[in-house]
Image (cartoon, coloured by chain):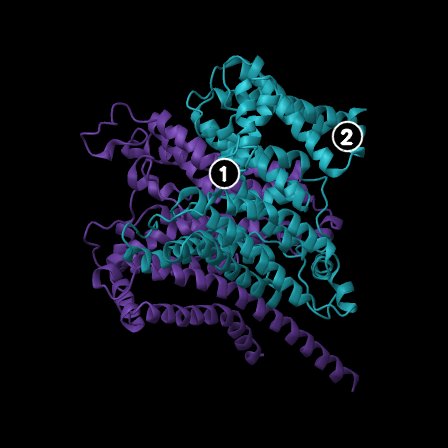
Amino acid sequence: MKNETIRRIALALAAPVAAVFFATIASSVFLLIAGSNPFTAYGDMFEYGSRLEIQVDILNRATPLYISGVAAAIGFRMNLFNIGVEGQYRLAAIVAAYVGASVSLPGVLHIGLILLVAMLVGGAYSGVAGVLKVTRGVNEVISTIMLNAIAISGLIAWLVREWQAGGSVDATTSNLGVGTEPIDESGLIPNINSWLEVFTREIGKGKELTGVFLVAVAVGVLYHILINRTRFGFDLRATGINPFAARVGGVSDKKMVLGAMVLSGVVAGLVGMAEIAKLGRFNPNFVGGLGFAGIAVALLGRNHPGGIAIGALLFAFLDTASGVLQVTGSASREIVFIMQGIILLAAVIAYEVVQRFRIREEARLASALLEGESQ
Amino acid sequence: MILNQIRQLPTWARWASFATLGILVLTLVQELGQNETSHLTAMTTSQTALKWSIPILLAGLGGLFAERAGIINIGLEGMMVLGTWFGAWGAFNFGPYTGILIGIIGGAIGGLIHAIATVGFGVDHIISGVAINILGPFAARFLSSEIFTGYQGGSVTQSPRVESVDKFTMPFLAGGYDTPNFLKWLGDKDVPMLSDAGNILRGVLTQTSWATIIALLLVPFSAWLLWRTRFGLRVRISGEDPWAGESQGVNIYKYKFIAVMISGGLAGFGGAFITIEMSSIYQEGGTTGRGFIGLAALIFGNWRPGGILAAALLFGYPYALQFGDFDGFASHALLLVNAIALVAVTIWAIRKSKRADAVIAFVLATLSAVWYFVADTVPDWWVKILPYVIVIVVLIFFAQRLRMPAANGQIYRRGQT
């Protein structure tokens, strides 16, 4: 029995470990071709990443990545590919920033309103793709990609101009004022440095751990409960594994598609909140690419709440720690993009191989047991 | 009545009558519309529209090869990105023709990765494709940082300028090689309808890049390869019923591998085309989702080369209209064209007694028409999103009634059903 448990854990870890190992080897080859020493480069990154200040940066980067990963994972759980997190979170962020700036409320209410608006906008926008799929059979991959383009190059570009804070587009001053009207202090999610400092020393160098970190933790816990402890989560997984069987079992797949799509967008709406809390407004240089990175993180974490967290931390470490490479000059910092890409692809393949191996093993075990019975 | 007669015509005549009908609508809108514009049927518009259609066409043909072999290729966009980078690198170092070839190879490498994952390891097609869409831009970014930053005028996000391939102008019709320019003469005459058709044709035949011509020739070539050769039959059996093919001794893995690599190569051609023929430079994010629009063209084209070409032209047209439409009148006039097209869809839906389609089409037609008559111009953001809106609207009406290869997207393992 004990052997069995060890086996299971070893099998679960085999795929991600193999993927990271393979990616490290492959990236080393790329580094060597580029004329850099891989050991120095990795050493620099680990030394840099072990500093407390940098770890705060890593957590700040991992927070939106994690939320984005969960948003994508909710769809993936039922083979629904919401590629539109990118457009959903940016649209949600600008509307939430606008609404947040136009009201003044006491702290908790103000923050709550901003989060609520972001979730509603994200859910509504992904809901469009859900409705198109359910009623018209439009593939959600294509529709969400088109909706991304519509949101980013159309709606947001227009709203940024429309909601431009008054009189601030002055070429003589810095572009600090460019963006929507600033949100009052009461609407900004405070940092949680004091929470972290309970465990560690004081965080210096003006680093702040975003309060949205707690939101991300809550999202993760709720996601876990939703998937594993609720009827909706069960139906969601059932539809993902075998839609025909689920339909026979009385699950309306149309309702599930729409529900999963909207929920995915609701979570996506929260992705931009850390940036809003930091900037206090939406500006034209608002952080991008978190939606696509979230998809990678979800695939890496196998849609599992804990797995996504590990994936988000890994990608955040690579993104952040690569900054040191520019300083030490031991390699080009873009090497982390290659690493992330290879880790992702290798993980996707490794999961498949391990899964296949596991099924074969189980079949072998079962037949061995049967043989034992008949003797 | 007329529709039935059109349906009985041979294919080329049917397409020709649809094209004539389209030109007629464009002309009428221009002649009778609120604002004076000649941009809808201008020579420059058709010239640009053709150019903008080519990457979509190539991505669509790429999708065709993969999906005819039963492999969904969401990764076209990532392969296209590889094509833009390798195309720029090749064109900068060895000239534009070699550049296109190297772009094709770059895309085919992406196709190979997709084939290894999906065919070799049996990974879910969409997951692998999504992974490649993330890997492609990452790889391009890394390669740029290693190579383009060392070139004069290059950086992490762009390459130095590259040259385009040679152009061709049709003699006699469009005045190439110092011959008389018949279509220009016709266009100057200002005969309603005929002059507009002449201008559109002249744009297509003037200063056409050889890369465009090769891409267009790939349409009949793909049709011949897939439907008239032994190779094509084996590719198609891999997508329709691989197990039946296997029982006939066909090496399904081999044909799926080859088809997906061709698919990546075509997407890479599309990417190289963007770099070499359109922007003259590699730019990060320069594909702007055209790999996905190619997939939409594949669906709207009903998994057939001719249909994909028609879809690519349809999707390329609104892009072209943005250029040179400084007063915004042409984009405004397009609202009326859209309304007319949607009325046609309404009539079609009523005849087929599809109530939902008819209602949706009618509502959209009304909105489009009301907007046309209420406003004088359209805002610039509308012009920007129009191509994407058209893709969605087209899919709303046609996503359900088309037939894709039977075993498309299924994971095939030899010896297992």
| Residue depicted at 31% across the width and 71% down the height | A38
**What percent of the width, then of the height, locates residue B362?**
66, 22
| Residue depicted at 59% across the width and 34% down the height | B314
The chain letter of the purple chain reads A
Q: Residues within 10 Å of mark 1 (few under 14, many from 20)?
A: few
Q: Which mark is residue B177?
A: 1
Q: Nearer the viewer, residue A119 or B225?
A: B225
Q: Is residue A114 above or below residue A287?
A: above
Q: Is residue A279 above or below residue A312?
A: above
Disc 1: which chain? B
Q: Nearer the viewer, residue B333 or B201?
A: B201
Name the residue type under label 2. Answer: Ile
| Residue depicted at 55% across the width and 53% down the height | B266
| Residue depicted at 51% across the width and 26% down the height | B42
The residue where tag 2 is placed is B6
Please tell me in which quadrant of the rendered image residue A285 appears. top left
Give chain B's shade: cyan
- Badge 1 vs badge 2, beta-carbon distance below 8 Å: no
Q: Nearer the viewer, residue B56 or A278?
A: B56
Q: How many marks?
A: 2
Q: CA distance from mark 1 to mark 2?
A: 38 Å
Q: Secondary structure at mark 1?
A: helix
Name the residue type under label 1. Answer: Tyr
Q: Which mark is residue A209?
A: none
Q: Secondary structure at mark 2?
A: helix
Disc 2: which chain? B
